[in-house]
Amino acid sequence: MTVTDAAPGQDLAAQFDRTIARDQRIEPRDWMPEKFRATMIRQIAQHAHSEIIGMQPEGNWITRAPSLRRKAILLAKVQDEAGHGLYLYSACETLGADRADLTERLISGRQKYSSIFNYPALTFADVGVIGWLVDGAAICNQVPLCRCSYGPYARAMIRICKEESFHQRQGYELLMTMMSGTAGQRAMVQDAVDRWWWPVLMMFGPPDRQSANTAQSMAWKIKRHGNDELRQRFVDMTVPQAEALGVTLPDPALRWNAGRGAHDFGEVDWDEMRQVVAGNGPCNAQRVARRKAAHDGGAWVREAAVAHAAKQARRAEQAEQAGEAGEGTAA
Ligand code: FAQ
């Protein structure tokens, strides 16, 4: 739908509702309620920030990867995450958001990013577990977002999900290798699983009964499933993978419930999640400080790019004035 498609006088709000009801996409030039726009900016910006901050726990291991092959894989993965951040910031700009403002909101703590990236990656096994569990949870949450009602976000998610699935497999393959190694390597994997399991379950957001945004986001078909449903789906998907790997998920309450056709599992420590989201997790200060330092350190690149663009524009204008327009004299 585009605004220009609407017949004169047609109620734009009704048109928006019809587009959602028909499962079609809202595109950047379409009319949309301001609350829809604000919700999309909030979610996409948080997602973009998560990808960018999410480069840090694994990026920390690039110089210490145990082989050339592992280093090449890890470099590719971390670069993919930077790319995901960029697609998502671009999707956010289609809604009128300003990139510099979004970055400012991240480094000043006014905009959130996923709680999961405030935990440390202590050993190389953490790299595998981040791929297996963090990317696994990300896929579970993000595949339905490929059908999100906002077109640019839905399209960005298709490519992101393809790359996330490579990320998950590389993590699982790394863990398989470590689990067929020494007792010490197996213990490292189990330790990493023990530390990451519960924070990963927090990635899906608070329980639906406490979720401020789920009902409206589902009505607008931004979210296709509630937080609890996706968390359950992830647990059910992961249990057989843990068995195949030979690790124990650290939850004594975890068991198959034949009646429900799903696994029962223990209660997430929601107080811990609230603390981490509020800025008090183990690595919040370090993550934001590093992002701020990188942003400040990159100021000269941004200034140089702006100066270069201005020079190009000036030269093009001079060439046009000299009657040479279109001859590609600007270098
Ligand atoms: N951490 O009402 P809801 C990745 C906030 S990318 C921090 O349920 P909503 C790839 C939430 O914003 C991971 N804050 O909210 C990768 C809201 O606060 P607000 C990121 C959280 O939006 C892998 C409040 O709590 N993925 O992993 C969290 O309907 C490896 C109430 O929550 C996405 O962003 C949390 N865990 O549902 C990269 C996916 N959970 O804004 C590197 C897109 C909730 O009202 C390495 N986002 N909050 O102040 C979504 O699907 C949704 O935004 C949810 C939250 C499901 C995350």
Image: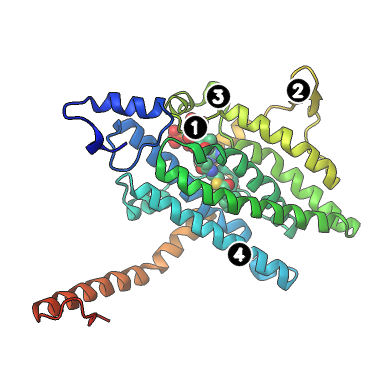
Instruction: Indicate yes or no: mark 1 CB to ligand 1 under 8 Å.
Output: yes
Mark 2, residue position: 261
**Residue 183 vs residue 30, the one in the foreground:** 30
Q: Is mark 2 within 8 Å of ligand 1?
A: no
Q: Tell me which corner region of the image, top left, top right, bottom left or bottom right, holds residue 227.
A: top right
Residue 291 at what x, y percent from top left? 47, 58
| Distance from Cα at disc 4 to Cα at disc 3 | 35 Å
Q: How much space separates mark 4 and mark 1, taking CA atoms? A: 29 Å
Residue 208, label in figure: 3
Query: What kind of element bears circle 2?
Result: loop
Residue 256 in view here: yes
Q: Amino acid at mark 1?
A: Lys
Residue placed most toward the observer, 89 or 29: 29
**Disc 1 designates what residue?**
223
- For label 1, the crowd category at 10 Å Cα-Cα, with few meaning under 14, some 14 to 19 and many 20 or more, is many
Q: Is residue 131 left or right of residue 118?
A: right
Callout 4 secondary element: helix
Indicate if the residue with disc 3 has its beta carbon within 8 Å of ligand 1: yes
Q: Quadrant of the N terminus?
A: top left
Which residue is located at x 58 percent, y 44 percent? 281
Give the answer, above or below, for where 295 lies relative to 169.
Answer: below
The figure's colour scheme reads: rainbow
Q: Looking at the picture, does residue 308 appear above or below residue 131?
A: below
> Is label 1 in contact with label 3 (beta carbons under 8 Å)?
no
Residue in the image at 70% along x and 49% along y? 132
The reply, left or right, for residue 150 in relation to residue 193 is: left
